[in-house]
Amino acid sequence: MNTETKKKTAKASKGTAKKDPKKIQVIEGMNLKEISEIIGIKAKDLINDLRKKRFNVGGNDTLNAALMDAVSQITKIDIDLISLEEETQKQAESKPENLVEKPPVVTIMGHVDHGKTTLLDAFRESNLVQKEAGGITQHIGAYQILHNDRKITFVDTPGHEAFTQLRARGAKVTDIVILIVAADDGVMPQTKEAINHAKAADVPIIVAINKTDKPEADLDRTKQQLSQEGLLIEEWGGDVVSVDISATEKTNLNELLEMILLLSEVMEIKGNPTVPAQGVILEARLDAQKGPVATVIIQHGTLNQREAFVSGMCFGKARALFDKNGKSVKKAELSMPVEVLGFSEVPNAGDYFQVVKDLETAKRIAQYRLSLVKKEEPTRPEHLTLDQLFKKIEEGDVKELALIIKGDVHGSVEVLTDTLPNLSTDKVKIKIFHAATGTISESDILLASASNAIIIGYNVKPQQAILDMAKEEKVEIRSYNVIYQLIDDIKKAMKGLLDPISKETYLGRAEVRRIFHIPRLGSIAGCLVTEGKITRNSEVRIIRNDEVLHKGKISSLKHLKNNVTEVKKDYECGIGIEKFKDIQEGDAIEAFIIEKVMPE
């Protein structure tokens, strides 16, 4: 390089290069044109030199490991490739004068039924408990409240032990942990887990001893148990803040909020509002109307509508932002939890969220990250149903149980993928073959058929067409809406204690062409069987305009004038329905049978 080129190199590398001109830092996802500008040489010359080394590249090609080595050899410059998040984090904290105080992010942790959701309800005067399946919080949520003109962001983590991973993720993004302990129950297993997560994340803890209004409350015993776990409260000569509360009676809640604000002042929690927005994905799901949606907590900067972003291997543009009440907002500021629409696909909870200059940059970075992921070839474990599991284990015919997990939100899917393999025994290993958010699809059925796996659906209901396809492919689908019930079923199946289940078997479908009114018999539907068959002993659904009007039994089944037990596809028949007179032309009749299936 000549003197002029060296000057250009130093100037172009300012902010990204170190003082040594022979070593520079570049950000992942940069293309060769951008790299050449940082180095200070013409992109055309760099590309020509690369082509001489048999790299068929252009200016828009993204830098990868092989290209990075080649560019280093050509330019005699060491290139240090750093992540986008690493670079933007440095930028956010590089100028202390731009840092301002931001609302603390507080995570509420503790044992199941010790009052976490009730406490949060009391803070924001709503009622989530009645909305949750089984009374247990199923997904992480984040909410912001105002106390004495100051904002506090709360992260509500689930209470059941199966949600350990979600609870750990909550601690990663939080500034302060409120450990809620019931005075009548004391320190329980999940209380200890919460303490360990908070300590591992190096997050200060405020203890909230709840249910102090109960006659059986024992504050001294609870505080003694806490000291045994390494939490010595101030009252006992320690340094851990403790507040005695009653979430239901709303006793001492203001004191608890004051302690949060006081501790946040001491900690000097700050963020930089001047840099491009960056934060963390707290929760993500696939919404039937909105598409991929994620809850993001902003840690630096301000997120505005229509800004491009990248998160893990996903990218997009913020098409819409919604606050905790589902109200559309134009921007999200420091520590604000916001629901973001516009992702290319459902991101992973816990991934960083970073605003970039345009959608093309976001897409390029996401594609670069995707190219680094090595896809493993799927294995083909032996097929069996959950009912058959114990028998196969005893016979020694099964060593691996393959599962495909589909859930409504990423957090639940992640918990299942972490929890279910831990149920493995020395006789059978549980392996998650595939896990994703969204409804059960045809591709899931085909994958399960090819890999001999069982499909577990959590908070997702397969359509009839999918159930039909599963039957044809002999694929078992199990649906649940509370995770511990799912886990209990797996445990019972492995011990041979699985309860009998009701299985619906679809038989066929008929279309009503005419209505005949027969004295003493009532209305008879003249039908054409269009799918499968209709049997005399089957149950039926009457469907009109895609809505189920009635479920019942067949009272009579005729072909021509003869009573029959079965009518197959493409044949006409007369069908009488018990206790249903409102049958109309154009209605559809679906026939099915319900069977109690015992474990084999």
Image (tube, rainbow, N blue to C red):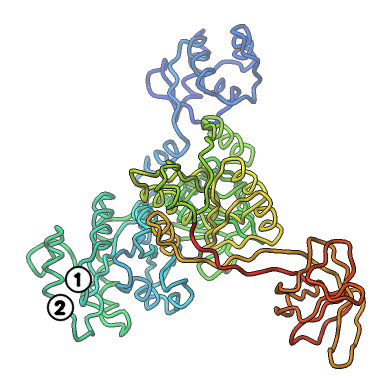
Q: Secondary structure at mark 2?
A: loop
Crowding around mark 2 (Cα neighbors within 10 Å: few <14, some 14 to 19, many 20+) is: some
Do we see residue 296 in this rendering? no
In contact (CB < 8 Å): disc 2 and disc 1: yes
Residue 21 screen position, x and y as percent? 42, 17
Q: Indicate the amino acid at tag 1.
A: Gly
Residue 31, compared with residue 572, is above or below; it is: above
Residue 176 screen position, x and y as percent? 29, 59
Residue 538, compared with residue 84, is above or below; it is: below
Q: Would residue 224 be found to the left or right of residue 441 on screen?
A: left
Mark 2 = which residue? 218
Q: Indicate the amino acid at tag 2.
A: Asp
Q: Secondary structure at mark 1?
A: loop
Residue 459 screen position, x and y as percent? 54, 63
Mark drawn on residue 186 = 1
Q: Dividing the picture into quarters, in which one does residue 339 lie?
A: bottom right
Q: Dividing the picture into quarters, in which one does residue 246 lie?
A: bottom left
